[in-house]
Structure formats: structure tokens, C-alpha cells
């Protein structure tokens, strides 16, 4: 079973982060990323919010490190582990903006980018950026088609329902022949979008039973990734049996990668938990 990590510090949800994270630095994050790299984890993540309304912060949290700057730094502190946006909100960006900026990240990292994308739900943030909200689903579909036509292309061109361009050079561009695009969300529609336009699905707040049922309705490619998260942080040191059962349940539901969050009380404890989780996953 492959493992990935919801990277501590970079996003702090109310009641879900450890106290030590509040004073942590980028060097602490880099040490965690390096441990994941050493232990064979598949990828680490960084989410995106440009600005969270103050009224929403008690529910969604207010801390969201910028994925481009953060993953660019972590690329220089790691060697193998992949770097995933989880997720980039498509409606906030022009496809060529993503192709250039994240294509550069792919170059910097030596081809380790995973472009996790989503439709977005926070209307106030769309309004802040002057981005259309009501047609965001159709716009996201067109953006994914545009990205597939443009990533890794020196002079991309695309004609779609919302985006149209040609005659522009994107240099540097991604070095991967096909940058993996994974779709986030919590609906059957997000899975359908992922199966049609992407290379994987990384849902949140969807039970293993629901995932299994939805996957049974959709035809997916043999190499399609299903990236599932446990319902709660794992404690592979103190709760070995419960953690093993959780990993097995996610595998039975169809997970190809488990995107874990961990119980941890310090940087050292976090790394110990990463080591313990890797040992458990090897045995499954």
C-alpha cells in the first residue's frame, strides 16, 4: 500500500492541528518532507486558499500556505517524493497561468508535480478575485481540457467553451510528458470529472462504503489513482490494530494511495509516527 501525507503546519483546521504547529517554521516542514522522502511516501500535499473570509475562519481555518512557493521550497529539500496541490481551485487561474507556474515547479522538482485540482465552493473567495462562481463546474471542465492540451507544450493552443488561445510560448513548461491531474471533491460528479478528464480522484469526507459504491458505477482506467483519507488522524504507535484496520478498509474501498494525517505532539513525534505508519503499510 502506498502512503502520502497531509502535510502538517501548511493547513491548520480548527481543532484538528497540534499545538506545536502554531509556532513551526518551514524548516520543520522540510524535515517532515525529508522523512517522507526517506521512508518512501508517494507524495506530500499543500492546499490553496487565497483569502478566507473572517466569518468562515472558525470553520475552515485561516492558515493555508501558498502551494507554489511552499512546494518549490520543499522540492529543493527532497529528492524523490512527489509534490501535490490538494487542491488548486481552477476558477482562480487561467489555464496558461497554471501551465507556466506549475510547469516551472515540475522543472525545478525534476518532474515530481501532481496537479490536484478542484471546482471550489467558497463564493466569497471567487467574488474577491473577480472569478465567476455560478458556472464554475463547466468552467473547471474546460480548464482541465485546456491544461491537458497545454501542460508540457512549448507553444500550446486550445479552443474551448471558456478558454481559447494560440500563439504564446510557455517556457519553461512541464518536463513530464503527462502531468498527473487529480480531482478533489466529495460528490459523484467529482469522480465522474476525474474519470473523464483526469488521472485520479482525491475525495474528502466520503466514507469508504460510499467510495466503493461510486467506483462500482464508473469505468476507470487501469492506472487511475484513488487517493483516500482516513476518517480521523492515525496513531500507528499507540493504536496499531486500529490503524491497520483503517488502512485495510481504505484498501478494500479501492484506495491505491492512502493520504494520511497523523496524531503528533512535536516534530520528533511526527517523524516517529511516519516511520511507524510506513512499517505497518509494508505488512498489508
Image (cartoon, helix red, strand yellow):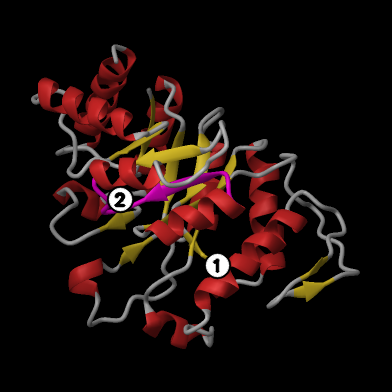
Tag 1–tag 2 contact (CB < 8 Å): no
The residue pinned by badge 1 equals 90
Dot 2 falls on a residue whose secondary structure is: loop
**Residue extending farthest right:** 167
Return the x and y of residue 44 as percentages of the image width and height.
43, 40
Q: Quadrant of residue 102?
A: bottom right
| Magenta extent | 198-207
Residue 163 picture quarter: bottom right
Residue most extreme to the top: 283
Query: Is 220 within the magenta?
Result: no
Q: Is residue 92 above or below residue 3?
A: below
Decide which of 146, 275 is in the foreground and name it. Answer: 146
- In the image, farthest residue toward the front: 217
At 32% from the left edge and 53% from the top edge, which residue is drawn? Answer: 204
> Quick check: 142 above or below 180?
below
Q: Residues within 10 Å of mark 1 (few under 14, many from 20)?
A: many
Q: Position of residue 227 (x, y in %)?
A: 40, 40
Residue linked to disc 2: 9
* Viewer-closest of 258 and 254: 254
Amino acid at each position: 500500500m502506498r502512503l502520502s501525507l497531509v502535510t502538517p503546519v501548511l493547513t491548520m483546521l480548527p481543532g484538528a492541528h497540534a499545538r506545536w504547529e502554531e509556532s513551526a517554521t518551514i524548516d520543520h516542514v522540510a524535515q517532515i518532507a525529508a522523512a517522507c522522502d526517506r521512508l518512501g511516501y508517494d507524495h506530500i500535499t499543500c492546499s490553496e486558499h487565497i483569502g478566507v473570509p473572517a466569518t468562515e475562519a472558525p470553520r475552515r481555518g485561516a492558515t493555508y500556505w501558498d502551494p507554489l512557493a511552499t512546494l518549490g521550497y520543499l522540492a529543493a529539500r527532497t529528492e524523490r517524493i512527489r509534490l501535490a496541490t490538494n487542491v488548486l481551485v481552477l476558477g482562480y487561474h487561467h489555464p496558461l497561468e497554471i501551465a507556466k507556474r506549475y510547469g516551472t515547479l515540475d522543472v525545478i522538482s525534476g518532474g515530481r508535480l501532481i496537479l490536484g485540482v478542484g471546482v471550489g465552493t467558497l463564493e466569497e473567495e471567487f467574488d474577491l478575485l473577480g472569478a465567476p462562481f455560478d458556472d464554475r463546474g463547466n468552467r473547471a471542465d474546460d480548464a482541465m481540457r485546456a491544461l491537458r492540451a497545454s501542460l508540457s507544450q512549448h507553444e500550446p493552443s486550445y479552443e474551448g467553451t471558456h478558454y481559447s488561445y494560440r500563439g504564446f510560448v510557455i517556457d519553461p513548461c512541464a518536463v513530464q510528458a503527462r502531468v498527473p491531474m487529480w480531482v478533489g471533491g466529495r460528490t459523484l460528479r467529482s469522480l465522474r470529472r476525474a474519470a473523464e478528464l483526469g488521472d485520479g480522484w482525491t475525495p474528502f469526507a466520503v466514507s469508504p462504503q460510499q467510495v466503493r459504491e461510486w467506483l462500482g458505477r464508473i469505468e476507470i482506467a487501469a492506472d487511475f489513482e484513488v487517493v483516500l483519507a482516513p476518517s480521523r488522524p492515525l496513531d500507528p504507535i499507540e493504536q496499531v490494530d486500529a490503524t491497520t484496520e483503517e488502512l485495510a478498509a481504505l484498501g478494500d474501498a479501492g484506495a491505491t494511495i492512502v493520504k494520511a494525517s497523523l496524531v503528533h505532539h512535536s516534530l520528533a513525534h511526527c517523524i516517529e509516527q511516519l516511520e511507524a505508519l510506513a512499517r505497518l503499510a509494508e505488512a498489508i
